[in-house]
Amino acid sequence: MNTVSINIPATKNPTYSVLIGEGVLKELPTVIANLGLFDSVALLYDEAVQGLAEKLDIEIMIPIKSGESSKTMSEAERITSELLARGINRQSLLICLGGGMVTDLGGFVASSYMRGIGHINIPTTVLGMVDASVGGKTGVDIGAAKNIVGHFHHPRSVIVDTDTLSTLPKEQFCEGLVEIIKIAAIMDKEFFEELESNIEDIILRDRPTLTSCIQRAIQLKAVSVEEDEKDTGKRLLLNFGHTVGHALEVLLKFTLSHGKAVSIGMACEMQLTDSEDADRVIRLLERIDMPTKLPQQYSAREILEAMKHDKKAISSSLRFAAPKRIGEGTVMELDTNSFELQFS
Ligand code: GLY
């Protein structure tokens, strides 16, 4: 078992641990005991992991329907009412078991319930492990506006048990690998090279290789979150692929998965940097069977419009993050003319 510690000094509980390894879920009772005394514990879980949820032996169990469509205010209200009815109070603990949808929604409920209670994240997807469950971003969607309501509310602990990935469908597994390739490409050349060498073993879920690459990705995410908790500097680099990717998700009304949208976004954004490393990133994405080309049915102008619409809420300029060279991510202004020229 390995541990990554995350330090956010200005918060109420400044340090939390991410336990990583095969079978580490059995440590849950110890993790809870080490956090202190809780009046009660409630488990929020994705119905897709019902079997795993039952094994945790927690009396108060609240299932959530699978899929991003559950990440809503009305679902947060339903869960809140349920917690209230089951006697959950300020000294209680909420456990969130599932992918990014559950940890985003559950973290949001934990951040708001009685002005904030503690929660533990137990991600069961690659995407959840390396991105959503770590770093304190919580939120729900309003229509196409993803994560538009939410708080920074860090979990008290995160348990990353790579055994839980054995039943994850291959496509969903590879969609999560996109975020690992992303973080290596922007922050760590050596890690990127290791991914290039080991990607077949990772796809085959060779447990030690997979566990070590998930751990490395979490360590890198921890560095960016510790340096820039509130997303105004280094953490923005984690948006590599997301400026184009999010516009595609919106245009396609979320019928394209987040991982695939980000994969296409990374390929496009790399090409905009004129980096000689663009081909390496694209090749690695292709080796995990992820798409790297913009969907034919939209013109470059339509995609640009979707990006502008999305960004209007937060900024007047269109920016994106990408590595000029592998391991060296930067945030850049998007040149809309060259985007149109390149992708028409
Ligand atoms: N998902 C990107 C971040 O946590 O900042």
Image (cartoon, helix red, strand yellow):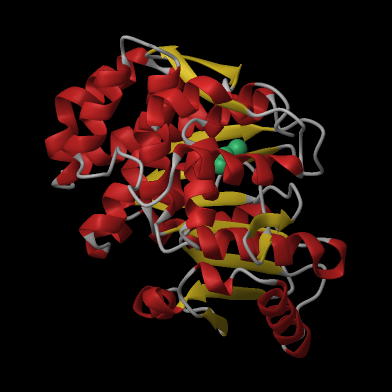
Residue farthest along the right direction in this orientation: 115
Displayed quadrant of residue 279? top left
Residue farthest along the bottom direction in this orientation: 85
How many numbered marks have been drawn onto this rendered protein structure?
Answer: 0
At 60% from the left and 68% from the top, the residue drawn is 71
- Is residue 340 visible from the viewing direction of this image? yes
Q: Looking at the picture, tell me which residue is in the foreground, 44 or 295.
A: 295
- In the image, is residue 241 above or below residue 35? above
Question: Where does the image place residue 67, in percent across and percent down from the top left?
Answer: 47, 71
Question: Where does the image place residue 162, in percent across and percent down from the top left?
Answer: 32, 51
Question: Where does the image place residue 246, in percent across and percent down from the top left?
Answer: 53, 46
Image quadrant containing the N terminus: top left
At 37% from the left and 14% from the top, the residue drawn is 326
- In the image, is residue 198 above or below residue 191? below
Question: Where does the image place residue 102, in percent across and percent down from the top left?
Answer: 54, 65
At 13% from the left and 38% from the top, the residue drawn is 201
Q: Looking at the picture, tell me which residue is in the foreground, 246 or 92.
A: 246
Q: In which quadrant of this rendering is ligand 1 seen? A: top right
Displayed quadrant of residue 170? bottom left
Image quadrant containing the C terminus: top left
At 52% from the left and 67% from the top, the residue drawn is 68
Q: Looking at the picture, tell me which residue is in the foreground, 92 or 320.
A: 320
- Is residue 21 visible from the viewing direction of this image? no
- In the image, is residue 212 above or below residue 48? above
